[in-house]
Image (cartoon, rainbow, N blue to C red):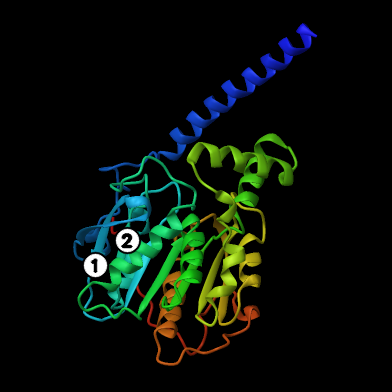
Amino acid sequence: MFEYWHITLGVVALFVVLALVIRWAVRRVLSGAYKAGEVVENYRPKNFSIPDPQSIEFTGERNTTLRGRFWKAAGDKAIIVVHGIDGPSIEMLPHVAYLYRAGYSVLLYDNRGRGKSGGHFSTLGFLEWKDVLHAVRWMRKQPGIDPDQIGLHGLSLGAACVIMAAAEDKQIRGVLAESPFVSMTIMLGHIANKMTRLPTFLIGGLVRLLLDWSLGARLRIVEPHAAVSKISPRPLYIIDAEHDQLFPPETARTVYDAAGEPKQFWKVHRAPHANCWHVKPEEYEQRALAFWEMVFSPNPPKVLYPTSAESDGQARQGYQLEKTKSRPSA
């Protein structure tokens, strides 16, 4: 009997120590490799032929200070750009450039635990999607911005967050989401499966529970697939990377299929995860600007062109804008 309890206590102690080590490792990883002062070498406003922005800050969820950059254009329409989990927001500068040059005011901020924003680590979307709502509220207070003329553009985790935010805030005019995932549980299970070969349905839940404990979060609610239908009847554009090495195949398409009209879908051939602009920059900009032109039109269509027309090549006829070039100069 003593030997049985001795073994049991030993196993429990080992599990507790292992869990504490994993918790420490998770929080260290999610604290971010990119903090203040680190930028992508060539990504500066002058290299994209746009002016220096205004430095801003606003209060996010749980009173966390979020900091970013604001480019005010002459018009009253605005787009908030939200980056992914592992990069500094400055990586989204190419998108800021073509949007600003097309006449949109743009807010680009650092997610919590990233760049110059407060917070010690990412919460994998649990608080980040609510931070998007705080960013929208900040934008609505800016002079010269029409509170009803605000759109959202997100990448990867940012894509998931803008979908969930738009589902909550019915005033948001439209959403462009590149490389969104179905749910955090499924995404974690897929990544853990690639590392351990354990069944996705089993390991995903276990990893999520561990991260919930580590982050003080409830990642079960980070589920853009369940929220995306609430964006309708506002326009949605889902952009998918053909060679996504992080998410399971057809992840973005699954989110798209769950959405209501009006919606668009574009799979970028040969693009890795969250790198569609880098593979086809001119076409990406052309399609994105055509989408936003439609979103902010007085009477956006209730149904968009069929998905079968969404292949590489010309942007959809009738919403084609002159190509813009905003890649960084050498």
Question: Which mark is on residue 71?
Answer: 1
Question: Which mark is on residue 207?
Answer: none
Q: Could you tell me residue 191's position as x and y percent? A: 62, 44
Upstream in the sequence, badge 2 or badge 1? 1
Q: Could you tell me residue 300's position as x and y percent? A: 47, 89
Q: Residue furthest bottom?
A: 299
Disc 2 marks a residue whose amino acid type is Leu
Residue 258 lies left or right of residue 180; in this view the side is: right
Q: Residue furthest front?
A: 1
Q: Is residue 271 above or below residue 99?
A: above
Q: CA distance from mark 2 to mark 1?
A: 9 Å
Residue 80 lies left or right of residue 55; in this view the side is: right
Write the residue at 56% across / 49% down: 219
Q: Is residue 228 above or below residue 69?
A: below
Residue occupied by mark 2: 108
Q: Is residue 135 visible?
A: yes
Res 225 → quadrant: bottom right
